[in-house]
Amino acid sequence: MPSAPPRRAAASSPTTHTGVAFGLLATLVGCGEPPTTFVGAPSNPEVTTTAGSSSSTTSPAVDSGEVDTSTAGDDGRESSSGPDPGEDGSSGGEPPECDDDRDCGGDRHCDVDSGTCHACITDAHCEAGEVCRAGGCTPGCSATQPCPGALACCDDACVDLLGDTANCGGCAVACAPSHAQGLCDGGVCMIASCDDGYDDCNDAANDGCEIAGTCMCTPGQAYACYTGALATQGVGVCADGQQTCNAEGTALGPCVGQVLPALEVCGNAADDDCDGSVDEDPDLDGDGWTACGGDCCDEVGVGCFAPTLVNPGAFEFAGNAVDDDCDGVVDNALAACDGGLASDSASAGDFAKAIDLCRVTTLAPAEPTDRTWGLISAELLRADGSPNPAAASRAIRPGFGTAITPHAGSALAMLSTGHAADPSDVSPGYAAFEPGTAMGTSSGMPADWLAAHGNVAPNAPGCPGAFVDTAYNPTMLQLVVRAPTNASSFSVRFFFLSSEYPEYVCSMYNDTFVALIDSSSGANPSDGNIATYDDGTDVWPIGVNILDAADGLFTACSNDDASQCMPPGSTHYAGCESTAELAGTGFDTVLWGSSCAYGGQIGGGTGWLRMRGNVVPGELVTLRFAIWDTGDEILDSLVLLDDFEWSVDASPPGVVPG
């Protein structure tokens, strides 16, 4: 394990560059000369080689400073192995087009089995009303891929149950009255017109235009009538009514007193839906809930267009005019739950409330129908899952500083590598982020995340990795949640701030924030971390080094020379937009003393960003939000978390520039 330079070592004489200076590894391990000019990327970068779905890094040779590219293709990725070229120069095999989605670019996706790029691999890559077939999105639907708007999925096609005569009020329910032209109006079959020579006397579409010739009846005479499906007439509770001939003897009045099929009433010993069975309670849509178990939408029909997505286990999706969770109210949002929480609460459940995850449920309810979505358990831990993180490193606040306020509700959660407080806060109180506070706690880094990176903590491309795998001053919020039955993804807003900006950009000391998801969904990063930005070529972990990944990822700061404390010297960063959000946070304080010739504000931050992850509807998901000091215990960082939301749509995982 290479030794690290002293944290406060002065940088070598700075040179002026355009962009942000990453690519310090060669200098740090003593190989080659430091670059003097580059634009946004190192002039002597490491070469990343890819094999299957894993990647490795080829370091510059220590003796010569040269890069070993014996297994790399022209683009730096490992070429397909395959047979050796023949004497005629033929390749003996084509290299795969891709190893993962990043190789495809744009909105295309990688089929890792064939190594080819396509517009879609699964239905989740398509819009609502489209399914993935032969690598392309085509019109269609399924039980898990719904139709848009008020359309229903019938026989893998999206149809309008309110106006389609072939599917009037239900799938394959044809509106085709005899001797007439049918009209489906609001899901009800009606007679638009009678064929020549026929008349409709009883105003019922079920028997069409039933009179050959002109309608004639005896004035005042009562006749039996029934307007429901003829197959249900006289079955169960269904019964005829009566309609009376008008005074002119030319038409019958409305059908009065008839009993039509209705939803089966549980436990009343009657055949309410007139299908010949009493008190049956099937799960027609296979979503785990029956009508008697609270499912208000068990088969496709008027007002029930996607049955598998509507049941007591669903979340209420605002604005779709559907009672998604079958509580009897349409589009009702959960009440806010983050008011009145103690800033120094020791309850991890309060931190779930602070990020607006309000609903609570149980792991194994007595009744299977009670397995609603919500928080099952919550814990405050160290980064490796061990107990007793520093109490002062977490807080629930109504804001941070004088400008940062919650995105939802009245509070936000705060996790820090030092004290989770601004200069005006108490419980816990404030301590300066630079030089920082050694909280006296440490742990391993999350073992599964570290193992996914070959047991070497990742850093931004071109920056040196941590020289130890210890997480100093760690704090982690772990949540076990049952996902709603209609959710395919979720999102959380965050705001990361660090006193390492700008002096220690691109160092082995850069503090780490991860958001790890344990889900059976295959649409999340392989290491489980959604606190990353994928630029299509590289994956950038959230931290101070994210500033070089793309515009809009690190904006709450003052433009200045970066990496002043790290060889080969400083470069200028010009992506800051405003320091307004730093006001009153402690990160706006002018530096306490000379730090490698830097004397500006203590730090900077990302601004509010949103990260997304994918879930399988109804599954148990574990979420871990963790932050720690890397390399040593000084120069603190902090992350704010808020506005947890579910979505019915799958989403590209990770962070989108704000």
Image (cartoon, helix red, strand yellow):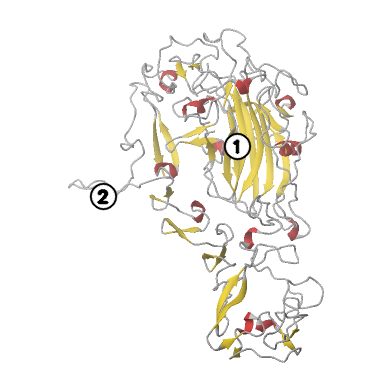
Q: Position of residue 564 (x, y in %)?
A: 49, 14
Q: Secondary structure at mark 1?
A: strand
Q: Residue at x 73, y 34 (%)?
A: 410
Answer whether residue 385 is visible to the viewer in this image.
Answer: no
Q: Secondary structure at mark 2?
A: loop
Quarter the C terminus occupies:
top right
Answer whether residue 356 is visible to the viewer in this image.
Answer: yes
Q: Residue at x 51, y 21 (%)?
A: 505
Q: Which residue is mark 2?
A: 92
Q: Position of residue 51 (x, y in %)?
A: 40, 42
Q: Which residue is mark 1?
A: 515
Res 224 quadrant in image: bottom right
Q: Is residue 244 above or below residue 170?
A: below
Under mark 1, the amino acid is: Ala
Under mark 2, the amino acid is: Gly
Res 628 quadrant in image: top right
Q: Which of the pair 392/652 is nearer the observer?
A: 652
Q: Which of the pair 522/464 is nearer the observer?
A: 522
The total of numbered circles placed on residues is: 2
Q: Position of residue 362 (x, y in %)?
A: 75, 50
Res 509 quadrant in image: top right
Q: Which of the pair 473/119 is nearer the observer?
A: 119
